[in-house]
Each structure stands twice: as structure tokens, then as C-alpha cells.
Amino acid sequence: MPRPSDAAEIMQRLGELAACTETRGEITRLFLTPAHAQAISLVCGWMQQAGLSTRLDASGTLVGILPGPSQDAPVLLIGSHIDTVRNAGRYDGCLGIITAITLAARARTLSLPYAIEIRAFGDEEGVRFPVTLTGAHATAGNFNQTWLAARDHNDITLATALANFGLNPQALAENTCAAHRAFAYLEIHIEQGPVLEAANIPLGVVTAISGAARFEVTVTGRAGHAGTVPMSQRQDALAAAAAMILAIRDIARARPNVVATVGRLTVAPDATNVIPGTCQFTIDLRAPEDALRHQAEHAITAALHAVAHADNVALALRQTHEAAAVTCDPRLQTILAAAIEKSGLPIRHLPSGAGHDAMAIASLCPVGMLFVRCAGGISHHPDESVMESDVEAALHVMTQTLQSLTPTDFAPGNPPA
Ligand code: HGY
Ligand code: MN
Ligand code: MN
């Protein structure tokens, strides 16, 4: 039986990884859950098969190490995430990690002047806890200790979840051991948008990553009997939240390049014949420029307060996450583009509306991203898919890129081109 091609093996592994889920029949793999532990064990085995040494760091990030020519050689970080949203596709995050393992196996024969560390982050989606990018922030040396108090929907804190996973949250500060030798970070990721497919181009060079902010909104009215409280006397938390949510949508619609999403909503006491007393919902707000996002945030805040006043309900707005917009390093963009051109493929530069681990790593070292075309631009959905030939193209371009990287070009003080 001939050995499958590298790309075929990656696709096969992504199928196996998809089975690491908490819900049969769909892919749901949240941070520090048994499904996450199962995925770590599977990916760790593949890393070891590729000749990498492995360790799980204090933040739950699985690290695969291909040593460099010396103990203190500079390090190229290649990362992405293996956690998912609920009912996810199999490529968001995971494609970058499984491809990186094959790439590292190839790199063993390239005598590169640097080491490679693959970082499989476990908390990029931020679905379980109201914080996100905690693993990548830990790698970058700026894990915020207050995040340890963040609670999931079972009221379990991140600190407890890390401890239950066999990790020591107090060791998080030591997490940057090798990262200070990192001269650059690369991430391979599906585009999660329609641009490459519409242009019939397999790969894209990411120019920038939109900044994002997340908020938790609590609307407090007054529960009451659905049959007896006159409409004029109601403090209906859900009706007020509905008006707020439509205001958020209209504010985003009115601003090109701003996107706002209310993805979660809970109502209490959640009974057909009771006027909702409280309602909680989330806001995910993004824009390519931070100033644009902040301006939209001010408009949204004003609109929420106006509705709260008109509906005589109380409003509490809490920011739970913020990631500034990030520009991908021009030198890395140039190297990726040259590798694409050398592969005989068309070059396309494009921004990312989706967030990525690279946003948190950007405070540590220059970051670059390679996008892979995905069918219909669909993501965060089981219909997410890529073509094996595009994965092969990504492998080829990244192999070329590895050979074009000179760590000293990225030494601090060497300004981007
Ligand atoms: O939400 C995002 O953009 C990413 O998929 N976490
Ligand atoms: Mn992702
Ligand atoms: Mn995602």
C-alpha cells in the first residue's frame, strides 16, 4: 500500500481529529475538556512520529519542538488552535497545526539555521470562558492573571479547570521560556471568507487582522404575570434587549467594515407566562481599524442606554475581551508572496475579518499568516471544507518559506521593510 501523499495524510488526520468531540455527530471541542485532552493526545502522537519533542505548557498549549543547530538557536513559532466553536468545521485552527507537523517533519532534512516550535493553542475561540487567546497570550508572556477567575457556564473558574487538567496556573508566568528566542510566528489558516474562492486562487497572504472586542450585556427589568401586568407598566427585559440588539445591528450596518454579532442570549425566568425579569446577551464587535471599532462601540453604548431609559430597565455592560487590530509583518508578507510566486501560483493579499492566535503573538514577534481557500467561505459550521490540492500547495509554499527565512533579518531593531 503506497504511503499517502503528505496532503492526503493531513486530510486523513483532520478526519481523525474531528472525532475528538463532546457531542457525537458534530465537532465541539472546548478548552480544557475531555475532548480537548483527547485531541492533545492524538496531536502529540503525530508530533512525536514527526520526530518532535513535545510538552504541554501551563496554559494548556501543546508544544512540538524541532531543535535548531544549537541550544540557543533562534526559534520560529508556527501555531494555531485545536479548540473549536460549537458544531464546528474540522479545518478552523486544526488545519494549521496538522499542516505544521508535516512541515516540521520535512524541515528535519533542511538544516535550517533555527529551531521550530509548533504551538497548538487550546483557547482561541473563547467559547467556554468569557476570555480568549489565553494560550497565545501566555506564549507571548502577557497572560493576565485576572483571567484565572473567569467562570464557565457551570461556574467553574479557569484556574480550577487548568488544575483539573493537571496544569499549574501559578506556573503561567514561566511560560515564555523559549518564546523570548522567537524571531517570527507563522500561521496557516483557512480564509473563513469568500475572497480566494471568488478569485479562484488557492492561497492568500494576510495583510492585517481585524481588531475585536467582546461584551456581556445584562438587562434587568421586572418579572411579572404575563396575563395581568398592563403593557404600560411592564419592565420587560427581553423586549428591551430585542430593541437593543436591533440597534446594534443597525449601527454596524451603517458603518462599512464594522461587523457586530449578538451570538448568545439567556432569559430569566424563561417561562412562557412570565414577563422576563432579566436578559443577558453577548456582543462581538470588529473592524479593521481600532478607531472605527471604538467609534462604533460608543454609538452602541449610547443606543443601549437610550433603550434602557425608554423601557425603564437597568443596563450593565461589561467588556470581556479586546484584541487590537494587527498588521502582519511586511517582511513575512514578502517572503510568503515570493514563495507563492515561485510555486507558480497567483498572489493575493487580503485582510482577515476573523481573529487568530497571531493577534496575541504580535506583541512578542513579527507575525505572518497564509490563508487557504475554503469552500463558500464557510466556517464555524460543519460545511467548512478545503481541497487537498490547496493543502498540498500550502505545504509547498510553506516549505519554500522556511528556506527563505533568515532570523537575523527579524532581529529587534531591524525595521520591517
Ligand atoms: O472569532 C474568531 O474570529 C475566531 O474564529 N476565534
Ligand atoms: Mn481560527
Ligand atoms: Mn474560529
Image (cartoon, rainbow, N blue to C red):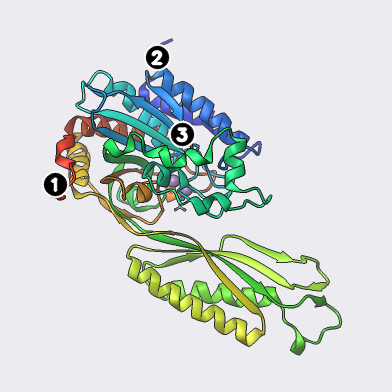
- Marks 2 and 1 in Cβ contact (< 8 Å): no
Q: Is residue 202 above or below residue 275?
A: above
Q: Nearer the viewer, residue 227 or 383?
A: 227
Residue picked out by circle 2: 3
What's under tag 2, amino acid-wise?
Arg
- The residue singled out by tag 3 in the image is 57
Position of residue 310 in the picture relative to residue 233 (left or right): left
Label 3 within 8 A of ligand 2 by Cβ: no
Q: Residues within 10 Å of mark 3 (few under 14, many from 20)?
A: many
* Callout 2: SS: loop
Mark 2 vs mark 1, CA separation in Å: 43 Å
In this rendering, position of residue 259 left or right of residue 245 = left
Mark nearer the N terminus (2 vs 1)? 2
Q: Provide the residue designation for mark 1.
A: 414
**Would residue 215 appear left or right of 352 to someone viewing this image?**
right
The residue lying toward the viewer, choosing from 206 and 407, is 407
Label 1, secondary structure: give it.
Answer: loop
Amino acid type, callout 3: Asp
- Residue 97, percent across and down? 41, 34
Residue sitting farthest toward the bottom? 232
Q: State the separation of the CA atoms marked 1 and 3.
A: 30 Å
Q: Assess disc 1: are there few (<14), some (14-19) or many (≥20) residues with their C-alpha within 10 Å of its C-alpha.
A: few
Q: Residue at x 71, y 66 (%)?
A: 267
The answer for how far apart the CA atoms under marks 3 and 2 are is: 33 Å
| Residue at (43% x, 42% y) in the render | 173
Q: Is residue 383 shown above or below 238?
A: above
Question: Is residue 247 shown above or below 270?
Answer: below
From the image, state whether disc 2 or disc 1 is nearer to you: 1
Kindly identify the amino acid type of the residue bearing the numbered disc 1.
Asn
